[in-house]
Image: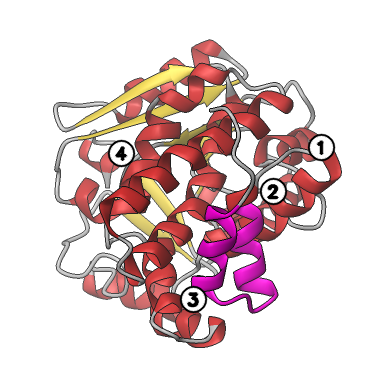
Amino acid sequence: MQLSAKQYIVKVWGRNSAYIETINKNRENKQYLPGIKLPENIQFFSNLKESIQDSDVVLIATPSKGFRNILINLKALGSEFDICWATKGFEVDTGLLPHNICEEIFGQNQNMAVISGPSFAAEVAQKKPTAVTVASNNLNFSKHIASSLSDINFRAYTTQDITGVEIGGAIKNIIAIGAGISDGLNYGDNARIALINRGLVEMQRLGVSLGADKNTFLGLSGMGDLVLTCTSDLSRNRRFGLAIAKGNSISKARSDINQVIEGIDATAAVFRLSKKMNIKMPICKTISRIIFEDLKPSLAVEELMSRDLQTE
């Protein structure tokens, strides 16, 4: 929507051909953007090759578990284009970030960028003021993407810290599950802000160990996205945590939300990575135990609060 508002021709690909046909016919994405009329300069395709024909830049907005396959399919088409993505999360099996996967498939000389930050699609579509970060291995490319996106309602900042931006986008979803659980148990504002703040520490701890700039996590893609995702009920990860706190099973909470909850896979990947690197991430570890080991949320909070005291 943002690119179409800047008068670009936007080609959208989706794997569900029947749903793509419905969107084309009604000019509305009733599942994800109900009530938003889609402009005519947004075209929809169920054929990937057709969707990228004559395109200079490909923007990927798939869940993290599908990111590698999308890149493999794009590579097979043999076309030349720059790549950016709004995908957030680690690859569970390998612990790789999206830019690591892109380098693996396209090589380190490929122009690539990640777009991240506190931004719900519905509010962007409604032209409500929004700010995000664009991180790239090529400063000129990041400036090009930022300029292409920015207008009076939407502001994009740039950075070269891809690792930091991607880690922020992944871990904030884990902490948001925890914030949802805390609020669902009525633990109050003190508990929520403590969780957010200590979650930021864990985000920085892992990020710096992987080569990120610590200050990146104080920006839009770090603290900004973390606070938004932990406090807004538009957040699927927060709603998932709320559902767990109310006694719903993991499977029921997932099915009721009926959208991809990136924090689940992120939790598995981050817990495995932190264990491998011997990095202390008690909140992420506890969320992992709740999701994958059936630890009761109330007991999880007791365990976190009874840990040995330490300096901040």
Which of label 1 and label 4 is nearer to you? 1
* Residue 276 location (% of width, % of height): 85, 44
Q: Nearer the viewer, residue 256 or 131?
A: 256
Image mark for residue 17? 3
| Residue sitting at x 34%, y 40% | 118
Q: Nearer the viewer, residue 152 or 302?
A: 302
* Residue 88 location (% of width, % of height): 54, 47
Which of marks 4 and 2 precedes in the sequence? 4
Mark 2 residue element: helix
Task: Kindly report the distance in space between the C-alpha atoms of the residues bearing marks 3 and 2.
Answer: 20 Å
Disc 4 crowd, CA 10 A, few/some/many (<14, 14-19, 20+): some
Task: Kindly report the distance in space between the C-alpha atoms of the residues bearing marks 3 and 1.
Answer: 30 Å
Which of marks 3 and 4 precedes in the sequence? 4
Dominant SS type (magenta): helix
The residue type indicated by label 2 comes to Leu
Task: Kindly report the distance in space between the C-alpha atoms of the residues bearing marks 1 and 4.
Answer: 28 Å
Above or below residue 262? Residue 241 is below
Q: Is residue 249 magenta?
A: no
* Residue 192 location (% of width, % of height): 35, 51
The residue type indicated by label 4 comes to Leu
Reading the image, the residue beneath label 2 is: 71
Mark 1 residue element: helix
Reading the image, the residue beneath label 1 is: 104
| Residue sitting at x 59%, y 38% | 202
